[in-house]
Amino acid sequence: MKSGVTAADARIQRKLGLGPRPNDPLDLDLETWLDMQLDAEPDWRALNSVTDMSEQIVPWPGELSWSREERVARLQKLRRGREELDASNLPEHERGKQARMLDRQYQCKDMDQQKFANGCIYGRDQVNRRLANFWFNHFTVADNGHLTVNMMMNHYEDAVFGMLKESFGDMLYASTTHLAMLSYLDNIDNRGENSKHARECGCFSGINDNLGRELLELHSVSPARNYVEDDVGGAARILAGWGWTYDDMQFPRGASVREPYVPYFAEPGSKTVLGKNYPHGKDALRLLTDNLAADASTLDHLSDKLAVHFIGEGRSGTEVMRIRQAWVESGGDLRRIHRTALLEAANSGEKKFLTPMLWIFQLSRMSGAMVFQGTTDDVRSENYWQAARIILGELAHNFWLRRQPNGYSDLKADWISNEHFDRRVRYAGFIADRCRPQLQADEMIRKYGFSDSTASLVAQGRNRTEKFILLACSPEFMEV
Amino acid sequence: MQRRQFLGLGAATAALAGIPIHGYTRDLPAGKVVLIILEGGMDGLTAVPPVGDPSLLQQRRSLVATNPLKLNPFFGLHPRLSEFAGMLALGEAAIVHATSIPYVRRSHFEGQNLVESGIRQPFAIKTGWLGRALDEARLSGRALAVDTPLVIRGAKAYDNFYPSSIQHSSAPDSRLMGLLSTSHEAAATDAFHKLKRIADSGDRGPRVRDPEGLAFSTGRAMRGPEGPSVAVIRIPEFDTHANQGVDDGLHPELLALLDRVLNSLKTGLGPEWKNAVAVTATEFGRTIQENGSRGTEHGYGSVGLLAGGLLGGGKVLANWPGLREKDLYDGRDLQSTLDYRSVFAACVEAAFGLDHDLIAERVFMEPKLARTHDRIFG
């Protein structure tokens, strides 16, 4: 598609990505810029420290990035440490103290959130990161215990970010089989009623349909497909055997961290989902996710969801159909689908209200302020209020919070309230006063080409802080 | 006990709404409604087990509390609901069993939308039943949550309360909020205007965020004729697919939390309790049988708990469908024999004095919605 908008200016970068940083070019050809962005490799950069006098951007340290295997190993150490503590004769308060120390030593979630936020602010891959955040919300995993929360960032990196240049079928399978998802939606407890496990040990064993249901409802076809309980049951039985419990971390035979399928727990026999039959065995799940990924209802559901996220709630049927058409023509190739959706968004006059996370990332990037703690800051002590978990938590928009599997809303009405706006006003003032923005409000207006009406509003501020608040909370900044 | 016969036997986050409009003379009762949304699908058969149904233990022996409180020969109450049991004994509570909103597709997200919108089609409307009831009662107002729940969205937007805790930040300035209010449109204008009003009043309310504390402060805020008429409290995590627990564990803890929330609400409301009704709502019940991971799957019929001084005597109401396999919905779930929106409608009628037919038609868009007011509040 040939774009009518030609330059990737600040508005376009905000609409399609996370917004420009102070030194980013604003005059690149839109499609050239977009292709560069879509082809970019993940750029994990971060602030050194919020206590530095000026911004020092460094690569995210390798020792604070953990592979899937390393995360499981840390969990195992945590579990063993807790078992030893439980068996000890230490007084209750001392055990509690040491348990907290163990948590800090082996859990990954605090640094994961720092890495996530820093990547969103300092990464030069703002469009892919925006897309990854969209899909991370679509394939929601959230804190419901150690296994899930310790694996979440790896889900983000491997199953979502790492799949942006693959097909939707690849992403669907990668997300469904990731330990974070298998744990979050209870599939680690999903065991065939007639599995070898059930027959041999006489243990309590049976189907848990949580993931099977959400695989259909949320991740692919949606209720519009009019599936029935037997379809949910069929999907759940195909999923039986995928994942295992936290209490049994020693990798059952035949399973690995990357392919956590345990035949011992699988339901034998063929299964049926939406009229299609699936054979017994591990490969049935890939067949299922491929069929779901190609289902017309999935294309309808997700084309519209992409349109709402990037274009806005007022997206037209034509815009959605063009995204769907790219889906059909490319066979579900995400890069082509994304490119079409983003160009539709660039050329649409529809406004998109910025959710709190998007708002604070854009404000941080565009002002060049040091908002989120960096790689050398202690997330639990000095300046802890600038930890990602605190800021995003206060904004009630943090992927690592406990929440339901349908993810955060993309609808404006769900993010407008005096309490939501109270937080935006407070953070805007905090950033202006304490986070050393490189650009003040007047400078941002000039550099990024905000409108005269926004400039008039900001001019009514009596000092730099007031001007910064007025710009950050202006209609033009909150909706793009 | 005969089947299909009514039995007349003896959170979280919160949102407030419905401050009376000054200058509008009302001759309707100024009651209070508190909706407690139990997100995830509450297992009504565990909360209020039909111990007199011989199929109960056959179907779900492993999910029935060891020593349920005895309400009558047919129904028991989970022991973690002891404060609620006390309210029942005082005639300040009621139970409606085998009930659900008219929704059978077992999706949380559609179901939760319908619990709040009060209609039959998910995501088809941008207002909620309490918001529309407030519109009909000519009450406007405010909402304790970061967001404004769909259920209280009506013709007007309602303000809300859930205090932030942002270190080194300053409260919004009245002048700036005025400037932002006039620069925005529609709901955003309202939200900034409310921040201006709060800044002008200097009143930020109590800074508590735990469910019981929120329930208490919600109740206090609702006291008196000028207080909000409606509150919404959310208690999440009732989606007990794994390790649901029977006497202890996740589900019993959630019931205990609900119990404390109700008690804190009563304490907070103080003398206003006599004019109030709190009503629970959940998107669906759970399967009658335990699944493979000591939990339950999404079901259909569940139970509704009501508490407050507006209620007339402790009652358990149910058109009991039975628990034999042939009695179950889809052969797996407790059947619903009452559209739970009838219970919502009864609460609106009792608190705001609106005519049932008007409530049915204008609030729930369901002219034939059954009237249950007299059975629950009579």
Image (tube, coloured by chain):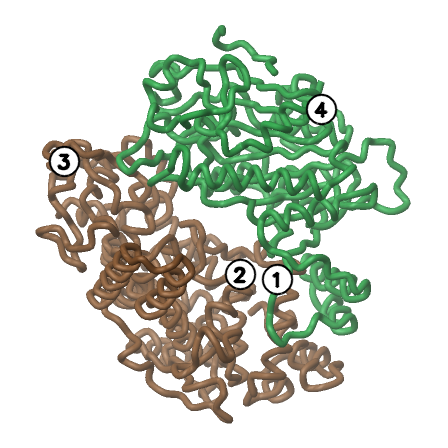
Chain colours: A brown, B green
Above/below status of B141 relative to B300: below
Q: Residue drawn 61% across and 78% down? A: A430
Secondary structure at badge 2 equals loop
Residue assigned mark 4? B356
Badge 3, how many Cα within 10 Å: few under 14, some, many 20+?
many
Residue assigned mark 2? A396
The earlier-in-sequence mark between 3 and 1 is 3
Mark pair 3, 2: CA separation: 42 Å
Mark pair 3, 1: CA separation: 49 Å
The reply to whether callout 1 and callout 2 are in contact (CB within 8 Å) is yes
**Nearest-to-viewer mark from 4 and 3:** 3
Secondary structure at badge 1 equals helix
Residue assigned mark 1? A420
Labels 2 and 4 share a subunit:
no
Which quadrant of the figure has residue A40?
Answer: bottom left
| Whole-percent x, y for residue A254 in the image | 9, 52
The furthest residue to the bottom: A53
Q: Residue drawn 35% across and 19% down? A: B57
Please, what is the three-letter code of the amino acid marked with disc 2?
Ala
